[in-house]
Image: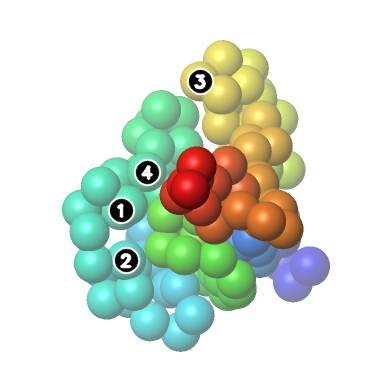
Amino acid sequence: MKGNEVIATGRRKDAVARVRLMPGSGQFSVNDRELLDYFKRDTLKMIIEQPFSVTDTLGSYDVRATVKGGGLTGQAGALLLGIARALVKANDSLQPTLRRNGFLTRDPRMVERKKYGQAKARKRFQFSKR
């Protein structure tokens, strides 16, 4: 940890996000790219910024994150959890607010595995009587 830098990890589905949070002007950097350059959908940007808007800290921290694995939605969820955990490390008094909004709970849902003799996890091949 350099100075006031806080590091936290967030996970969702197959995505893992390593988040560095430091006091600043609210700049986002995801995999060395701008936030809107990496997450092009406004809904994903909104998901990522939720912990800041709930705790009224939007624009007071700079975020540098590296995200790997999964798709964009999973990566956005991982980033949300990582940011929420980093905010708690930076300021303990924010924990009740983040907990109440469900931002500190890791979403346990994972993709169900494909079974043999079936098209997908639950979808079957077409049944033919004759």
Q: Amino acid at mark 1?
A: Lys
In this view, which residue lies farthest toward the right?
1
Structural distance between the alpha carbons of marks 2 and 1: 7 Å
Structural distance between the alpha carbons of marks 4 and 1: 5 Å
- Residue at the image point whose x is 30% and y is 53% from the top: 45
Comes first in the chain, label 2 or label 4: 2
When asked about the image quadrant of residue 39, the answer is bottom left
Q: Position of residue 42 (x, y in %)?
A: 20, 53
Pointer 1 local density, CA inside 10 Å: few below 14, some 14–19, many at least 20: some
Q: Position of residue 10 (x, y in %)?
A: 66, 52
SS assignment at label 4 = helix
Number of the front mark, 3 or 2: 2
Q: Which residue in the structure is indicated by mark 1?
A: 45
The disc placed on residue 82 is none
Res 24 visible: no
Structural distance between the alpha carbons of marks 3 and 2: 23 Å
Q: Which residue in the structure is indicated by mark 4?
A: 47
SS assignment at label 2 = loop
Relative horizontal placement of residue 27, taking residue 120 as reference (left or right)? left
- Kindly check if marks 4 and 1 are in contact, taking CB atoms under 8 A apart as contact: yes
- Kindly check if marks 2 and 1 are in contact, taking CB atoms under 8 A apart as contact: yes
Q: Position of residue 116 (x, y in %)?
A: 72, 58
Q: Amino acid at mark 4?
A: Ile
Structural distance between the alpha carbons of marks 1 and 3: 17 Å
The disc placed on residue 101 is 3
Relative horizontal placement of residue 57, taking residue 83 as reference (left or right)? left
The disc placed on residue 39 is 2
